[in-house]
Amino acid sequence: MAEYSLGHCLCYAFYAPLYLAGPTVTFNAFVSHMACPQKSYGRSRMLFYLARFVFALLLLEWSVHNLPVFALARSGSLNFSPTILGLFAYTILLIMWLKFLVIWRLFRFWALCDGVEPPENMQRCMTNNYSVVGFWKGWHCSFNRWLVRYIFIPLGGSKPGRRWNVFVVFVFVAFWHDVEPKLFLWGLLNGVFLVLETMIKGLYRNSTALETWRANPLSNRKKIEKASSDLADGKSTNQ
């Protein structure tokens, strides 16, 4: 229990490389790196990580100079078609993803140089997300782990009847960003989408169709291959 001291707590709270923007690291992981600095990243791997950071930084600089989407959004002159507006919003999200990637990798590189290995945020591109859970695990992975460790699990985790704890977590996330009504609403909406997604996944896992598929994966695969072949030959799947 010696590691749970006031000195270690203050070091954790005010650790310079991660103080401003993260990535977020749990207290136990931080203290363990103080006792035993990380060895996962040697010199060659650190240089490669630095090169990736520099490439991302240059790409961000090119993007903000050649794709002034934020300036156009603030100007209010967006008299475009719905398709162009959709592409416009998508481009903004991609540049935001790249901006946070650069920020978090800079401070993570600093921490790695000091012997602390925080979790990597932005583990995959924003476009490579197919669920709300997957988005949060990939976008802000370190903060997601911190929330699970210190809020979600103490509230009961994902036990039956505890699904609504997600709202507590996202309300905390909203106020962690800033105390604003729009962020509070944003946090509630994230909670709604996450709970709905979890419920739909649960219903799908327990469905009879899924059980049939799992019981006969080979026969179902053959049916799909036959239907695809019939469609390719211009035949009806009912023949």
Image (cartoon, rainbow, N blue to C red):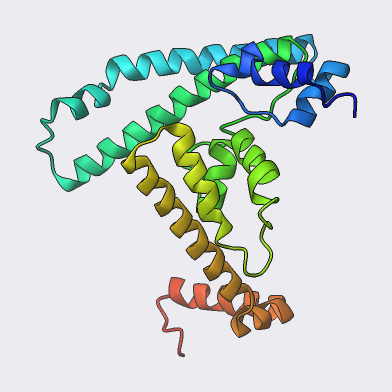
Q: Looking at the image, is 232 positioned above or below residue 13?
A: below
- Residue situated in front as seen by the camera: 119 or 21: 21
- Residue situated in front as seen by the camera: 230 or 110: 110
Residue 36 visible in this rendered orientation of the protein: no
Number of marks in the image?
0
- Residue situated in front as seen by the camera: 77 or 87: 77
The residue at 44%/59% (across/down) is 192
Residue 126 visible in this rendered orientation of the protein: yes
Q: Looking at the image, is 204 positioned above or below residue 125?
A: below
Left or right of 133? Residue 36 is right
Identify the image quadrant of residue 108: top right
Q: Give coordinates of residue 22: x percent, y percent.
A: 58, 23
Q: Looking at the image, is 182 positioned above or below residue 54?
A: below
Q: Give coordinates of residue 92: x percent, y percent.
A: 33, 32
The residue at 64%/29% (across/down) is 120
Identify the image quadrant of residue 20: top right
The residue at 54%/69% (across/down) is 199
The residue at 80%/13% (across/down) is 42
Q: Give coordinates of residue 161: x percent, y percent.
A: 62, 69
Left or right of 200? Residue 212 is right
